[in-house]
Amino acid sequence: MSEIPARARTPERNGENVPGGIMWQSSPPGSIYDYVKVASFSIGPDGLIDQWSLRAEQLFGVTAEDAVGKDPIEAFVPDELRDLGHRKVAEILDGREWTGVVPFRMAADGSMDGIAEVYVMPTETEHGEQAAVCIVVDVRALRRIETDLAASEAIFGQSPFGFLLFDTDLKVQRANRRFASVFGGGADEHRGRTVHDYLPRQEADRMQAALRRVLETGDSVTDMQIVGPAPGSSDRRHWAINLYRVHSGSGRPIGIAGIGTDVTRRHAAAREAAHARRNLALLNEAGARIGNSLDLETTARELLDVTVPVFCDLASVDLYQGLLDGDETAQPVRTADGSAELRRVAFASAVSDAPLPDGAAPPVTVGAVHRYSFNSPCADALRTARPVTIRNGGGDGSLVQSTLAVPMVAHDTVVGLARFSRAKGSEPFGERDRALAVELAARAAVCIDNARLYRREHERALILQRSLLPPGDPEASGLDIACRYLPGNAATEVGGDWFDVIELPGHRTALVVGDVMGRGLRAAVAMGELRTAVRTLALLDLEPAEVLSALDEVARGLGNPGNTAGNPLRPPQSPQSTRRALQGRDIDPSEVYLATCVYAVYDPVTRRCTFANAGHLPPVLVEPGEAALMLDVPPGMPLGVGGEPFEEVEVELPEGALLALYTDGLVESRDHPLDEGLHAFRDAITDPVRPLEDVCDHVLNTLDTHHGEDDIALLMARVQGLPTDAVGDWTLPREPRSVGRAREYARAQLLSWDLEALVDTTELLVSELVTNALRYGEGDIRLRLLLDRSLVCEVWDAGLVQPRRRRARDTDEGGRGLQLVGLLSAAWGSRRTPRGKTVWFELPLPDGDSTAEPSVEALLSMF
């Protein structure tokens, strides 16, 4: 249907024609015809199609060239309906109008395609013959529109949220019942309004700008926060607004949809959550800062450092005198009468330096011993182990308006009293504050009780500390080892230096020397934890730098190094240098856990040693016939400081060379600088041929160690590489035949070593490991046999997946390989390599301390 030329045009006002004019123009995009596809065609006097529109092509899938000249009944109506169709066409050509629903099919494949609603209007040709014009609408499109309209009406009308539709002039076109219930009136009464009719000017301007931006850009607005009073109320309400642009079927923007949700309660809950977060942050800080020392007074001061001035303006801590004297029998438990002697151990104030007043009683200074009167609120708190709130009316001229007297209870033991006060002008204490004060006092009380227990357990700590050092003379493959340990305090034998020799797979050995800053039990406890952590990390067979990185995390968890994390220290050369650096920055060294450590891994096959250093003194190497030299190993940061990665250095050690690891107590003292001590140490070990035990004694006797100032640890190792005839190394291609070749290589090598007794077991286990490498690994396979104090077999491949031992089910045909390896070997495991992984097992030599062969029951248990 062609467009009719416009005869007259009149302007539009609000979408309506101005009276008195006639509009002749096309409908703009977005009309109903964009959704309902209306097709047309005409039937000539002969009953055949003589006109076929473009929309008819789209609806029926038939071009005009194929449709014109055909009988519509024969082309589109199923066979069983054709007789009826021909009668209807005859009636239409006789001049009858007809409207109905007709099933049709696609002419291309003959299948049923849909149902069409047909409007037939008789007409005449220019010669007066009867013809017909047919208007066709796809019934499916009509039903889809009906469904969409019903769904839209349900969503819009039944939505529990306020729903608005704005036109392109940003005026309300429609509002739902929920919106009208909040802002009053009926839903139709809001038509034509703007956001300025609902919101304060500032918020309405924001909303108007957002609407305009959404209309222009098409970008949605999500969770826009709007604040304003509800109608008839002065209460401020919070709404979350979501806006998105609405389009017609052709894609033309026709308006904006807005959804509003009342989130006033959510904001109130958010405020409560903010208070809770602040309290949690204070508790978290308390957990990090309180208890870094096993000293009673220090712990009390840490509690006040956390609470003043964040929680209160003034605070004090009183502890029972019997607790401070170490008299456990005098320690009040549960039912204290509240009048026992207490000592003021800490006081802090953000408003005055004067001592905390106590009603009519004179102020108590720090260090003074006093009693609370039996009828006082503080005595009542101690007696009942419950907090008491004390409010000051202000008649005595005191600057305090509210006080919380909180008993410090740990393990049902009242250890003292903490008092928190707020000055006039501050918010009085509430129930939330009361609960927080109880939690803070309880945490400090636990730390104080730990200090009390520490005094009782001191002797046990000494026994534990001695047990942490390696017993006897350590042994290692390819190394002759001698060591010495001298605690700084000969009377208590408590120190923070340690050394260790750890056997690793493949006859490798880890050598460790470390030094925890400080002395006494605190350093010994930290040393024990670090040494245990080193042994645990060594079992994972990590690289030296990875071991120190993990150990640094452990060290930072021992105390509170947060006061140094923001501005890391320069790498010191010794713990004493670290102490001086801390003191220069007004940091109490007793509140920081720092340690230095050297971790080295020696491989006797290659005679190469990999070093990593965490702020420790460098190792000393003495080659045969050469002067002692200090190895250039980057010092790194001490453990516990964090923030910097550790570096590794690999050094090839000559046969017969002497390697020395030591702590600073050997070479540094108050009277002798570090450089002088290092020079004397190098001169004392210039004769590496002597027995190692004699070399150790000579060093300690020659150097002026000033024993008693610091702990001393000395670890010496003479290099004895594994002979080349004690190593068998083969590379196998990635093919099934490699399993048999691996067995042949292993058998031949064992026979050459006169280890015929181990041939069968070794062949079986080698076969299992190589098979696993073929199935689950990648790349070529490397087989290596090492003979020393035991037989070690290693299978290398490029795969990254580590083997996992599992118990096979009774019906499984496989899955028992690693179980078999575990039963027949003395030990087995896997480790990462730079290019994959290594799986290994170890067998004792026949003339050594052999492990008993597995029993028949043990072997059958796998099945």
Image: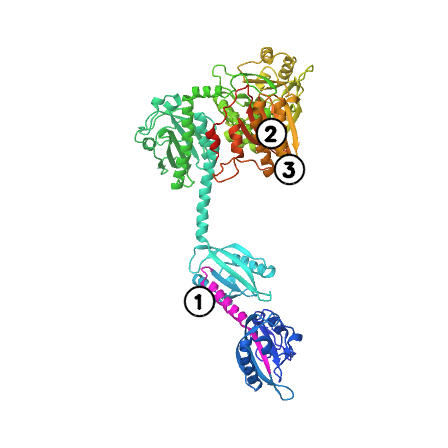
Quick one: label 1, few (<14), some, or many (20+) residues within 10 Å?
A: some
Q: How far, Cα to Cα, is label 1 from label 2?
A: 85 Å
Residue 607, x across and y down, in percent: 65, 23
Residue 723, quarter of the rendered image: top right
Residue 42, quarter of the rendered image: bottom right
Residue 5, quarter of the rendered image: bottom right
Residue 111 appears in view: yes
**Label whose residue precedes the other's in the sequence (3 or 1):** 1
Q: Which residues are magenta?
A: 132-161
For disc 2, the marked residue is: 794
Taking depth in this image into account, of 849 and 534 the one nearest to the observer is: 849
The residue tagged with tag 3: helix, strand or loop? loop
The label shown at residue 735 is 3
For disc 1, the marked residue is: 186
Query: Left or right: 738 with respect to 96?
Result: right
The residue tagged with tag 1: helix, strand or loop? loop
**Label whose residue precedes the other's in the sequence (1 or 2):** 1
